Amino acid sequence: MRRLILLACVIALLFPGVVRAQSVAVDVVILVDTSATMSDELDRLCAKLRDTLDSIRASGLSVRARVVSLTERSKCTDDTVRRLIKNSTVADDEDWGIGVIELVKGYDWQGSATRLIIVVSDAGPASGNPIEDPGPDRDVTTRMIQAAAENKVILSPLIGGPNPDVSATDRSRLERLARDMAAATGGRVFVSRSSTEVPAAISRLITAAVETVAGLTAIAAAIPTPGKISLDAGVLLTNIVLAVSIAVLFALTTVLATEAFGGVHRFSLPSNRVTDAVGHFARRMDRSLDVIATPSAWPIGNAAVRRIAMIVILTALLALTALIASFIDPDFKPGSPQGTTTTITLLIAFAVVTLAAAVGGRLPARSMQASSGLRVRPSAILIVAASVLLSRSLNFLPGFLIGLPAGFALLAAEEIAERDVRIGRASIIAAIVIGLIAWLLSWPVDVLLTRLADSLNSGAASVALTFAGGVQSALLTIWLIAIQFALIYLLPIGALTGRVWLSQRWLAWGIVFGVVMFAALHTLFNPTLIGLDALSQPGLLPLGAILAAYSGITLVAWLLTNESRIRAQQGLNRRSTLVAAVLLLAWLGGCACLGVSALASTVTATTVLVVAAIAGVVGVGVWGFVRVRASTNKQRINE
């Protein structure tokens, strides 16, 4: 462990001397559907486009971007297809299939740049809805794919947010056409849930185009390397505030939970013959399950046979877990070159993080002379499958990958909280260290990828680019799995290591949890957004849900346990009362922020007046009710 930490420190000291590579050129045409149903998306695009492009250029990409409409200029569009392409046959504002074909063939592309067309629309490519597949929409999609392949243009559709005027059938057909188009040309698809996601989607699709040329997987392409993380003061401050707020809320909730539910240690049953027998049976079952799930402890053959059994079982479990996790990529296709790369890089990442966490736990166990082994976890398959469903439903890349296929286990040992937290803490730190090393190593590989992408005329450079892209994908995926594993196990909930660590050394837990949370926010959950806009990031939703459920259940339990004291007007614990008040105020403030964030893109003066009027009426009503109730109670007391 000391060697790993020393290596990480050396790399961290050496890497500031690495020089950023020359810029990669990207020529982007953002083709927008200017029909009425896309008005909100176009407004948001126009408001944030300059900031989005500046952020991309700051990461090392040289971007030339033009916003083009089909027939008539609108808002921030630079030109139209009819004006740019001689003898254009575009029929209307939703005839974007023909528009793409004409731009692919006739646009004045930069010679050596990566060529990208981002189509922003919620309608079918053959003049809108309804969508016919098979029919005109499929036909024009086939023609787009052929033209893009011949002219080396990447097509990345951005589907507008849900619209009541667009049927579910048309929406499904549009997504299918978009995915076929992107898969055939090396692009990506972004399915928007609201107009607020458009700027971030544009940034992701532009970056992904370059990463596609470099052979990166979609999962890795969504993770910034050390040389590409945002240094914007607003983004840094936003993520620092979020990390500190989340850490404080979890800590305060745990303090309240300790009073409501008891301490961090398990309750012990009163000692008698029955409870002693039950306890003895439970301990034997725990040890038996550990042995069953730990092939190295099986009473078969010799140590070599058991070791081979462990390798075979773990490899099969790792492979199946990696295959299921690959479906986080919406465009994943088993057996395709890109799909195979995705599965292999996930397999490597799961294996590295699993073994690192196990080795980390083994070190303190060996110092305590406890018998231990590597325990397989078939439940990891279910956890990863649930993570895939959650990631896909939220349209979140790089996704959630927290289930490790194996873990460290103590054999034939009594449960001791202090010892268990030492082992858990060592496993978490080992995962963080190996993840940090992988993330830092992705920096020089990124420099190499950038240089190779500038010299793709060579066949050898193309092969080297593909290999380097695979290495980069594995490194960034290791970081993803390691940081999410550490974050989950640091949560001060239930039997997780974080709860006991918080109860023993709250300051050390707070520093480690805060740093890990900030790292996860800045590289995975919120790499670019500032202020309230960050609350719209889909990756934060599950974490917010966990925190909300934990706080809500704890507050209800605390109120129930103190109900008798409240009724008897007895004194309450001042510290826990203050904590409960702070939690309530924090969640009221959080709900207010979410409301402001949701309304930010659609708020008008009329909306403000209506909300103010409703708030005034409600306020006056509550005030009047309280005054009447107080007067009634006073009369009853006097009587």
Image: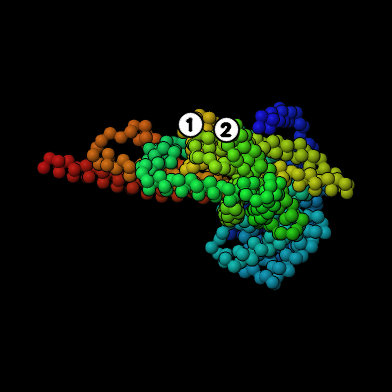
Q: Nearer the viewer, residue 544 or 118?
A: 544
Mark number displayed over residue 557: none
* Disc 2 + disc 1, Cβ < 8 Å: no
Tell me what residue is drawn at x 81 percent, y 55 percent: 152
Please report whichever mark, 2 or 1, sits nearer to the chain's N-terminal start. Answer: 2
Tell me what residue is drawn at x 56 percent, y 38 percent: 424
**Is 419 displayed left or right of 90 in the figure?**
left
**Coordinates of residue 620 in the picture (x, y in percent):** 30, 45
Circle 1 sits on which residue?
504
**Is 25 displayed left or right of 534 in the figure?**
right
Question: Which of the two discs, 2 and 1, sits closer to the camera?
Answer: 2
**Coordinates of residue 583 in the picture (x, y in percent):** 41, 39
Is the residue marked by circle 2 packed among few (<14), some (14-19), or many (20+) residues within 10 Å?
few
Q: CA distance from mark 2 to mark 1?
A: 20 Å
**Coordinates of residue 189 in the picture (x, y in percent):** 67, 55
Chosen colour scheme? rainbow
**Coordinates of residue 91 in the picture (x, y in percent):** 70, 65
Q: Nearer the viewer, residue 518 or 59?
A: 518
Q: Amino acid at mark 2?
A: Met
Tell me what residue is drawn at x 74 percent, y 59 percent: 335
Tell me what residue is drawn at x 71 percent, y 59 percent: 334
Q: Nearer the viewer, residue 322 or 301?
A: 301
Q: Amino acid at mark 1?
A: Gln
Q: Disc 2 on helix, strand or loop?
A: loop
Q: Quadrant of residue 175?
A: bottom right
Q: Residue furthest left?
A: 639
Q: Disc 1 on helix, strand or loop?
A: helix
Look at the picture and state if 193 lies above or below 532.
below
**Is 112 displayed left or right of 158 in the figure?**
right
Q: Is residue 79 visible?
A: no
Circle 2 sits on which residue?
368
Q: Is residue 146 visible?
A: yes
